[in-house]
Image (cartoon, grey):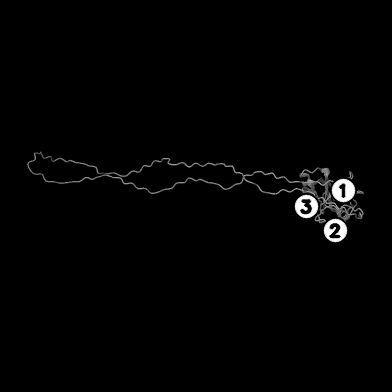
Amino acid sequence: MTHETIVAVYDTAAHADAAVRDLDAAGFPPDAISRTGASSGTATPGAAPVREQGFWSSLFGGEPDHDTAVYDRSIESGSSILTVRAPAEHVAGVTAILERHNPIDIDERSNSYGLGRSASGAIPATAAATAAEPSYGSGEAVIALSEEQISVGKRLVDRGTTRVRRFVVEKPVEQQVTLQSERVSIERRPVTGNVASTPDFSDRVIEMTESDEEAVIAKTAHVVEEVVVRKEATDRVETIHDTVRREDVEISRDDAVATKPAASPLARPKI
């Protein structure tokens, strides 16, 4: 498995500490993370670089170059340098974590130090640099080819809410009903002819009660309709369109005879 070394330079120990914590939380083993320069706390300008002979060679597999000179000057100024050794497929994740905590820009720092760039040096885009470690000892070099695979999952999406509310509506109604009224009428009429009666000069009272019928309203309720609320699930087949990437190689061979140039240190790709 091909491993790469990612380098980031931080001017403050707090930023370096935060990067180490995030790397640890992401599951990178402690022995894959190396820190050189100022420790946790306030960086001390002018501190001597904490490294031994061949330090950069052990990291990058080559002789010190322009970038390592910038690293040296940064350490002398009190900066912290983090190096992370990770498999090639984890380089993007490591770089994202390191970039999250404000690493310096190597070009800007190089210009501020007045350092020139060697012809073989690659111009970095940021302070996080990767150094590939190909295996040349066995006489072969390996290029890893990656391929993406698509995995389609499902998630529940709220498409709206159906609400059924029961409420009361009043409407006027009318109905005719026949009502009866009773009234007392008094009629006085003369007596004619011979009516056999015995006069009675005692008091007498006759009473009759008048009455009226009134309409009385009574209500009864009946269930006339039901509203049923339910959910129905239906299945559908949807075709998902996306793209996946894969790496390939283009092989070309130059059979022309040419003078072989002198070997020069490999330029490390900068992230």
Residue 46 rendering spot, x and y as whole percentages: 88, 55
Residue drawn at 85 percent across, 58 percent down? 110
For residue 110, which numbered disc appears in the image?
2
Q: CA distance from mark 3 to mark 2?
A: 18 Å
244 horizontally vs 197: left or right: right
Say what amino acid the circle numbered 3 marks: Glu
Say what amino acid the circle numbered 1 marks: Leu
Q: Residues within 10 Å of mark 3 (few under 14, many from 20)?
A: some
Tag nearer the camera, 1 or 3: 1
Residue 50 visible in image:
no
For residue 59, which numbered disc appears in the image?
1
Q: Residues within 10 Å of mark 2 (few under 14, many from 20)?
A: some
For residue 220, which numbered disc appears in the image?
none
- Earlier-in-chain disc, 3 versus 2: 3
Which sits in the foreground, 74 or 134?
A: 134
Q: Is residue 10 above or below residue 219?
A: below
Residue 263 rendering spot, x and y as whole percentages: 91, 53
Q: CA distance from mark 1 to mark 2?
A: 20 Å
Which sits in the foreground, 247 or 168?
A: 247
- Residue under numbered circle 3: 99
Q: Quadrant of the N terminus?
A: top right
- Earlier-in-chain disc, 1 versus 2: 1
